[in-house]
Every structure is written in structure tokens, then in C-alpha cells.
Image (spheres, helix red, strand yellow):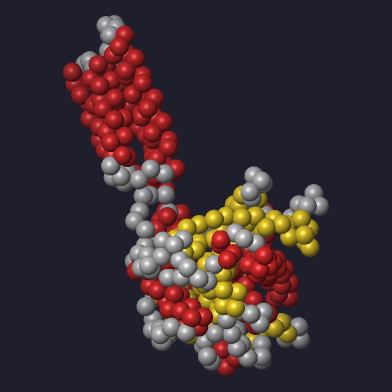
């Protein structure tokens, strides 16, 4: 929609400039009426939901409003146009308007209006956000000595009775807690309480209830950026970084789960009273998937794990003698579903940090594994729907899989897996390739 509106604006501005040049007149009155009409057209399209109002349209609304007010004032004053016609002035004004529309429509182009993936459950879904303060940890990324704040958002059945399994999500290296909103919504609509965590300073951006803002830490950003570059880290250094990253992630996840379990016992908040504390699953994308697998190894109360495009960091053992990563020899017994894109699938047999993910790893013989052919790393999040341009830029090109097919199939698989493992519903026999 944003690209279409920009194209229309470009055609109009160029055509009107040509008209003025050919007729050698400014046509001030005509352009004023057109500006007013454009603003009211925008309002009508918004009220009729052709344009779905959101942050992406704010700059355009402001621009059209200013132009409409300016045009109205000019018409009311009804001054005779005494300005001498100048071709250079017409061309300059047209160029300035094109730049203004390009700037105003940038959010709608980068974050285009799009349809939401299917939600198939019977429950209406509500959301709520909280900030939890970990009294046992000092924030390591600042020097203020404050306790670590962890922001979470819940998706839950608004109109449901009884209790529902708790599912905890961890985002990727540069992600945010809303990265897989369509997945959370689909799960909640089928009777799950989903909580997604923002890991402060691992998250691109997070805001606490008190207004505290934390953006991605520069050192962490550099560490992750250098992860796949040859010659930057030795295997021993990389192993140390993995341990550091995973400690922060799993500490956050453990803290959130323990906080929720405690609140479910004595907090009257309806959200906590909807949670079945005996049924817990964890899942995550990329680094969040690695942390989820780690937690499935660490905690006895985790009943199911979904790993979305991540290495099994918890299952790596560093052998200093031969400077290599090998897979743990301890069986992984928590039910596990692996979902891989082409980006990761192609590395399973060749990249050292995926040593434990190999298909022939006997410690994971009970795990389910599916490969989304044609998908890129971010195809397994909502970003290609929310911002195709940004997703393509971050993952080095456009994926060959339809984004709606990919995310809706992923959501369906995750739902069926958790239904089978946590609710005992149906059977789970995923395809090897989608």
C-alpha cells in the first residue's frame, strides 16, 4: 500500500509539474483543492479500513494535514496570484514534494501493511506486559549497580476457563519479544499461556514499565557479528562466548519461569491463575532456540522443547587437546522438535558449532526434525511479513519460500507438537521437508 501511494504521488507531482510548464501557469487554486481532497481521501480510506491505521501512516497523515491546512488558508484568503510564473520554481517545488512524500511514506514502505497469518483456535487472545525485577542479579551491562530488569509479554486465552500449559519463548540474537507474535497468538487461541521474554542488551530494543530503555549492547553485537567470520575467534574463545551468552539467556528464562510459578500460587492476577504449572514448554529462535534446548537439559519441569534454527550449544563439549567441538555423550530425554531453514540445514554437517545437531547424533534419536526448503533464517519469524526489506537485508537476500506458507506451517507444527507432548492430544508425525 505504501509503495502504491508513493507511485501515485510521484506520477501526480510529475504530471502536474508538466501541466504547469506546458500552460506556463502556477495553477495555485487547483493545487490547493487537490491537497485538501487528498487529505480527506486519506481520512476516508483510514475510516473504511482500506488503510489500517498504525505507526506507519503517522508521517503521511501529518504531511497531508499540513498541506490541506495550507491550501485551505490560501483559498480562504482568496488572494490573487501575483507571482510571476517560473519554470525553475515549478520544478523545484515538485522535487521538494516528491522528497517529502518519500520521507513520509518511508515507514509504510519499510514496514508495509500486511495481512496477519491465520489464527485457527476458538479462544479470543489477549495480551499483557510486565517487568520483573531479579533481586538476585545485578545488571552486568551497566555500572549503576541496579538489579536486572526482564520484560515479558503474555498472550493468553481471554475467554477461557480452567488452566492451560505455560510456553516460554526466547528471541534470537538481535530479536525482540514480539518476533514470533503470530506463533504466540495461534498457540494462545488453542489454549496456551505464552510468555515471550526480552533479554535486555541481547534484544534490539526493550522498554520496561518504568520507562527504562535498553538497546543492544555494542560489545555483544560485535561478538555475534564476528561469530561466523574466519580467524576472529579460536574455538576456545568461541566456547567461552557461548557459555557467557547462554548463562545470561538461561538465567533470564529460569528467573521468568520461577517468578511465574511463584505468582501462580499467590498472585490473584487472572493471567497467573490461568496457568497449569505442571505443564511447561520452552521454545525459541536462533540463540533463543539454543537457550531453550539448554533449559530442556537443565530443568526437570520442562515437558517439551522447540528449537527453531539454532545450534545445540548445551550439547557441545570443547576438547582442548585437539581444539575441536564434539557432541555430548549424554542422552537428551526431553521431547524435542527441530525446525531448520536452508541457512542452518546446510551447515549441520560442516560447521563446528553444529556438531551436536547432526542427524546421526544418537543422543537425539527421539527428536523430531523438519527442514523448510527455500527458507532463510528469518523466514521462521514474523519479520518477512512485518518488513520484507529489512528481513532481506539482514539475511542476505530474499527467501525462496512463500512467507505465509512458511510461518503458518511452522505455527501448525509447533501447535501440534505441544498438543501431543503437553496435552496428550492426537499424534505427531511431521514431514521431513516442507
Q: Residue, x 73% and y 85% (percent of image)?
A: 319
Q: Residue, x 35% and y 64% (percent of image)?
A: 118
Residue 284 visible in the shown view: no
Specify the quadrant that holds the C terminus.
bottom left
Which quadrant holds residue 307?
A: bottom right
Q: Is residue 190 left or right of residue 361?
A: left
Relative to 33, say whether 307 is above or below: below
Residue 343 in the image, given as x and y percentages of width and height: 48, 72
Which of the two residues, 356 or 88, is positioned nearer the viewer here?
356
Counting the numbered discs, the total is 0
Residue 326 visible in the shown view: yes
Q: Residue, x 70% and y 83% (percent of image)?
A: 317
Which quadrant holds residue 365?
A: bottom right
Residue 155 in the image, given as x and y percentages of width and height: 50, 62
Which of the two residues, 381 or 317, is positioned nearer the viewer here?
381
Which of the two residues, 367 or 43, is positioned nearer the viewer here?
43
Residue 402 in the image, given as x and y percentages of width and height: 34, 66
Residue 87 in the image, given as x and y percentages of width and height: 28, 18
Which quadrant holds residue 27?
A: top left
Which of the two residues, 72 or 416, is positioned nearer the viewer here?
416
Can you name the residue that lies furthest to the left here? Answer: 23
Q: Residue, x 62% and y 60% (percent of image)?
A: 268
Relative to 152, say whether 73 is above or below: above
Q: Is residue 150 left or right of residue 156?
A: right
Amino acid at each position: 500500500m505504501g509503495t502504491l501511494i508513493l507511485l501515485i504521488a510521484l506520477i501526480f507531482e510529475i504530471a502536474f509539474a508538466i501541466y504547469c510548464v506546458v500552460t506556463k501557469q502556477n495553477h495555485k487554486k487547483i493545487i490547493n483543492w487537490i491537497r485538501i481532497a487528498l487529505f480527506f481521501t486519506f481520512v476516508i480510506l483510514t475510516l473504511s479500513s482500506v488503510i489500517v491505521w498504525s505507526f506507519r501512516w503517522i508521517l503521511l497523515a501529518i504531511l497531508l494535514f499540513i498541506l490541506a491546512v495550507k491550501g485551505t488558508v490560501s483559498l480562504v484568503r482568496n488572494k490573487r496570484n501575483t507571482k510571476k510564473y517560473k519554470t525553475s520554481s515549478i520544478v523545484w517545488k515538485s522535487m521538494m514534494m516528491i522528497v517529502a512524500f518519500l520521507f513520509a511514506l518511508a515507514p509504510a514502505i519499510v514496514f508495509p501493511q500486511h495481512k496477519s497469518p491465520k489464527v485457527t483456535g476458538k479462544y479470543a487472545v489477549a495480551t499483557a506486559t510486565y517487568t520483573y525485577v531479579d533481586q538476585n542479579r545485578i545488571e552486568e551491562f551497566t555500572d549503576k549497580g541496579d538489579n536486572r530488569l526482564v520484560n515479558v509479554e503474555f498472550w493468553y486465552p481471554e475467554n477461557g476457563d480452567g488452566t492451560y500449559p505455560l510456553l516460554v519463548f526466547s528471541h534470537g540474537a538481535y530479536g525482540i519479544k514480539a518476533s514470533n507474535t503470530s506463533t504466540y497468538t495461534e498457540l494462545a487461541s488453542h489454549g496456551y499461556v505464552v510468555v515471550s521474554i526480552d533479554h535486555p542488551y541481547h534484544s534490539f530494543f526493550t522498554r520496561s514499565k518504568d520507562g527504562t530503555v535498553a538497546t543492544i549492547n555494542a560489545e555483544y553485537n560485535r561478538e555475534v557479528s564476528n561469530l561466523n567470520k574466519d580467524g576472529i575467534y579460536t574455538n576456545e574463545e568461541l566456547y567461552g562466548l557461548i557459555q557467557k551468552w547462554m548463562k545470561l539467556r538461561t538465567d533470564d528464562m529460569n528467573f521468568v519461569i520461577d517468578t511465574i510459578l511463584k505468582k501462580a500460587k499467590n498472585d490473584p492476577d487472572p493471567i497467573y491463575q490461568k496457568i497449569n504449572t505442571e505443564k511447561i514448554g520452552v521454545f525459541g529462535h536462533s540463540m533463543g532456540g539454543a537457550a531453550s534446548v539448554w533449559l530442556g537439559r537443565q530443568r526437570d519441569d520442562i515437558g517439551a522443547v522447540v528449537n527453531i534454527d539454532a545450534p545445540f550449544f548445551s550439547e557441545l563439549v570443547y576438547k582442548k587437546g585437539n581444539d575441536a567441538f564434539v557432541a555430548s555423550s549424554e542422552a537428551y530425554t526431553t521431547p524435542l522438535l527441530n525446525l531448520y531453514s536452508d541457512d542452518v540445514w546446510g551447515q549441520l554437517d560442516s560447521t563446528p558449532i553444529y556438531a551436536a545437531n547432526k542427524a546421526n547424533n544418537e543422543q537425539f534419536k527421539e527428536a523430531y526434525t523438519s527442514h523448510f526448503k527455500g527458507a532463510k533464517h528469518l523466514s521462521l519469524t514474523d519479520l518477512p511479513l512485518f518488513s520484507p526489506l529489512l528481513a532481506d537485508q539482514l539475511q542476505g537476500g530474499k527467501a525462496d519460500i512463500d512467507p505465509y506458507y512458511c510461518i503458518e506451517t511452522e505455527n501448525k507444527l509447533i501447535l501440534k507438537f505441544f498438543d501431543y507432548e503437553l496435552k496428550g492430544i492426537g499424534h505427531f508425525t511431521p514431514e521431513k521437508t516442507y
